[in-house]
Image (cartoon, rainbow, N blue to C red):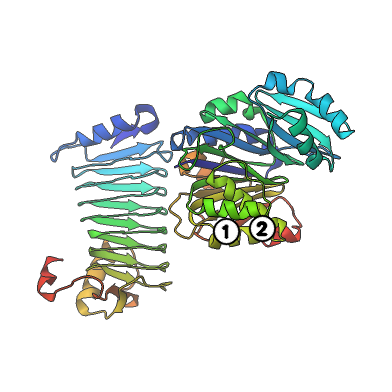
Amino acid sequence: MCGIVGLFIKDKSLEPKLGEMLTDMLVTMTDRGPDSAGIAIYGSETNGSAKLTVQSDTPDTDFAGLDADLSSALGGKVEISVASTHAVLTVPNGTAAVARTALKAIRPSVRIMSRGDSLEIYKEVGLPKDVAEQFNIEKMSGSHGIGHTRMATESAVTTMGAHPFNTGDDQCLVHNGSLSNHNSLRRKLRREGIHIETENDTEVGAAYLTWQMQNGATLGEALESSLDDLDGFFTFLVGTKDGFGVVRDPIACKPAVMAETDQYVAFGSEYRALVNLPGIEDARVWEPEPATVYFWSHNAAPTSSEKAA
Amino acid sequence: MQKIDLEAVGLREMNATLHAQADTTNQTQWEIVNAKGSHAIACGLDAPIEVTVKGSTGYYCAGMNQQATVNIHGSAGPGVAENMLSGKVVIEGDASQYAGATGHGGLLVIKGNASSRCGISMKGINIVVHGNIGHMSAFMAQSGNLVVCGDAGDALGDSCYEARFFVRGTVKSLGADCEKKEMRAEHIEILKDLLAEAGSDAKPEEFTRYGSARNLYNFDVDNAGAY
């Protein structure tokens, strides 16, 4: 099954409550999938620097002195903020790729969860309630975020198999469904030089979008072409720096409910996930149409890449 | 009027209370508050009672209904009124996918829109949708009537048997072996009754009938009475 949720804040006064609201929505979806949980939060930008969210199974040893070690490897200031098994590394702009390579050498057991200007991804094996508590998600503020609770079907229950999947700078994906052509597509994408870490089907979906966008597609175009190239069931929720997008496969048997008010746009696998949101009684509630790409952006003047979406 | 706070008593106690109503009960009016999208509300009822759910419901509301009338003052999640045998289910808002699936009898009224697979494998139920319906509706429908006052999505009535489909608006596409049919006086009569019972002021003459082309399954006119 899997449960997915998303919240896009329009009313800035709600931004400090993003983590709390999103956590409540995700916890409500727990019985759709108790294997692992994850949340992507688009928080404040760090001017002149980029954020890498990293994970380690042995955080005490891996994160100790990591900022200093990475600083000297990069030749620039690195800050670290540790939350349980995860840490957010703030690195100088333009050094994220170098930092990735450097991390492999100085901390081989550290895994990269996300990279971008504002995106942070926290995910672990366990119930949404426990994972949210582990990282203190409820206290996080931000402009938008997406979350996922997993019932694994296509690959092992591990941290790396948990959603959201980072697809590119400030981009991530959560998925309800199962892709049936992920093995052949993984081979094809690997031949194209795309890095795919696990045997998970959703990671292939995420890598597919990354590959499309590397080849010049906008997010909207990449989502459109996913309808042709991905075989299987999917409701995707895709986070970007400026907002989020929704697409469902043409059969659309994986559920999706959306609600919109003047204050927010919310997504849930079920209406239950939305019932505690403010003003839900008067919200416009609807189901996204199959094979249709939806997108909400904070940008009043969208760039070309968002127009298409 | 008996009132049940779902949040306070929980799903099992609420449904057990409703199940405990006998055919001769005097407590015929029930109201359920704090539905909050919960699953399986008012499932398996079998008494001539009227249950009104305040708010939207989750999966499988009013499933397997017999005799009872269930009103949903909100929208309904997937599988509402699934496998209904008799009685009436009325949804003020929209219905999610596979509303009225496999229903054998009774009337399902959806005052908003229904999404995909409405009336899939219907076996005698009558469904009246005031708005539109989504794709693959009435897939393998066997008998009963599906009335759509708005438009129908892709693949209406794919692989259907002897169910009747009446659509007032457009049909995006017809499914395999489903075709447009002539409206005869008897169909106008059926529609008139169903629309009146469903509280719709649409005129029967505005509808087009669709049904099975009878090329896909082994239809034998000698068995027509069985449907």
Locate residue B102: give its quadrant. Answer: bottom left
Q: Position of residue A257 (x, y in %)?
A: 49, 49
Tell me what residue is drawn at x 56 percent, y 37 percent.
A162
Q: Position of residue A66 (x, y in %)?
A: 78, 25
Q: Report the label total.
A: 2
- Identify which amino acid the numbered label 1 is placed on: Ser
Q: Secondary structure at mark 1?
A: helix
Q: Are marks 2 and 1 in contact (CB under 8 Å)?
A: yes
Q: Quadrant of the C terminus of chain B?
A: bottom left
Q: Position of residue B50 (x, y in %)?
A: 25, 44
Tell me what residue is drawn at x 29 percent, y 29 percent.
B13
Q: Nearer the viewer, residue A41 or A122?
A: A122
| C-alpha distance separating marks 2 and 1 | 9 Å
Q: Quadrant of the N terminus of chain B?
A: top left
Tell me what residue is drawn at x 61 percent, y 46 percent.
A173
The tag earlier along the polypeptide, 2 or 1, is: 2
Crowdedness near tag 2: few (<14), some (14–19) or many (≥20) residues, C-alpha within 10 Å: some
Q: Nearer the viewer, residue A87 or B8?
A: A87
Q: Position of residue A51 (x, y in %)?
A: 76, 37
Q: Answer with left or right where residue B42 lies relative to residue A240.
A: left
Q: Are marks 2 and 1 on the same chain?
A: yes
Q: Chain of mark 1?
A: A
Q: Secondary structure at mark 2?
A: helix
> Relative to B31, does residue A222 appear above or below in the rendering?
below
Crowdedness near tag 1: few (<14), some (14–19) or many (≥20) residues, C-alpha within 10 Å: some
- Identify which amino acid the numbered label 2 is placed on: Gln
Q: Nearer the viewer, residue A90 or B112?
A: A90
Tell me what residue is drawn at x 21 percent, y 72 percent.
B189
Answer yes or no: is residue A95 visible.
yes
| Residue identified by numbered label 1 | A226
| Residue identified by numbered label 2 | A212
